[in-house]
Image (spheres, rainbow, N blue to C red):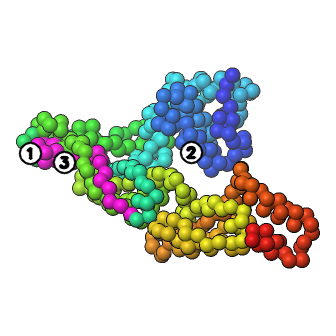
Amino acid sequence: MAKDYYEVLGVERGASDEEIKKAFRRLARQYHPDMNPGDNGAEEKFKEIGEAYSVLSDPEKRSRYDQFGSADGPGAGFGGGQGPFGGYGGQSPFGDIGDIFDAFFGGGGGGGARRAGPVRGEDIRADVELTLDDCFHGVEREIRVQRQEACDACHGTGGKDGQQPSRCTRCGGTGQVQQARDTAFGRFVTSRPCPQCHGSGQTVAEACLQCHGSGRQRRTRTLKVRIPPGVGDGARVRISGEGEPGARGGPPGDLYVFVRERPHERFARQDAELHVDLALGYPEVALGEEYDLQGIDGAIKVKVPEGTQPGQEIRLRGRGMPHLRGGGRGDLIVHVVVQVPKRLSGEERELLQRLRELHKGGEHDRGFFGRVRDAFR
């Protein structure tokens, strides 16, 4: 069955030229082979999209297609290349589909050759595991990283015995070569990295035997990194200029140290807040008490008010973690947990039974806590 070019582009038959163009751009990006490596179906779809656009973008061709070339009209078979527009011989109307994609979407086509400028080096990553105490105080750690560095033998020139590079004869030192293509949109000139100098614009007569002409070698380095107080799980610390070296005089990249925080046995952390459980018995929460609680940085006096309920929170201002960017510390949240004994002594059982009787007896005039005091006295 012949192709319906409107259906291929997903537009109505009365679509404007701009709507057709927008549909083509969207679909071409989606199905371009560079975006779908190894997907033969995507490549065929891309060619089909190009074929449809080459017809519907031309007023004369579109008029003839509307008259003869619809899928259910007398021009069926038109999509196969044998209709009134002449065939494409089974080839894409764009010639090289990668070139037309570059030209249409601004991938470097149509301009003159220009020398490749400095390129910043790649960033690299390292990971470090810290305890909660490390995160509280801050710590200095040694980090081992692998990165490219200048070759010792040629001192980064890429030439044997330190031979200096010369201008590439193929691209004239621009690092780019041009190629002209005739497409359905006209003649386009595209630029590609020079295959002889790999875009550097320079070559050496004889390559360094140690780095094979690259001028670089991969090395492992140990760096001291200062981790500031207040970091947390997933935080990253940037060390400027300690990444991969740049190309053609470009600056080096950065090193990013990612923090993984080890869980603490007592404290749970939420940003700059710390949370801790305080286990108390029934009499303590009923009567109230003052306790020495071990915080992240020493003992803290915690006053448990009379009548504290299970699960109630006591907030201790400024006793949590430091804020990463300064400005003091977060809070320590104490969660009251009431422990109910599983075994009772005879005296304990007798006191609790007496308390239960008082409660059942309706002695509410002195209040609940008054009865508790009487029972434990």
Q: Which residue is rendered at x = 40% and y = 46% of the image?
A: 109
Q: Of the numbered discs in the image, which one, if any, rests on residue 25? A: 2
Disc 2 crowd, CA 10 A, few/some/many (<14, 14-19, 20+):
some
Where are the magenta residues, as a range?
A: 138-159
- Looking at the rendered structure, the secondary structure element under dot 3 is strand
Residue extending furthest bottom?
366
Q: Quadrant of the N terminus?
A: top right
Residue 234 visible in the current orientation: no
- Looking at the rendered structure, the secondary structure element under dot 2 is helix
Are dots 1 and 2 in contact, CB under 8 Å? no
Q: Earlier in the sequence, mark 2 or mark 3?
A: 2
Nearer to me, 358 or 303? 358
Q: Which residue is mark 1?
A: 162
Q: Which residue is rendered at x = 31% and y = 51% of the image?
A: 143
Q: Quadrant of the C terminus?
A: bottom right
Residue extending furthest right?
362
Disc 3 crowd, CA 10 A, few/some/many (<14, 14-19, 20+):
some
Q: Which residue is rendered at x = 78% and y = 62% of the image?
A: 351
Q: Which residue is rendered at x = 90% and y = 72% of the image?
A: 363
* Residue type at numbered disc 1: Gly
Residue extending furthest left?
161
Q: Which residue is mark 3?
A: 150
Where residue 179 sits, quadrant-wise, is top left
Q: Earlier in the sequence, mark 1 or mark 3?
A: 3
* Residue type at numbered disc 2: Arg
Mark 2 or mark 3, whichever is nearer to me: 3
Are dots 2 and 3 in contact, CB under 8 Å? no
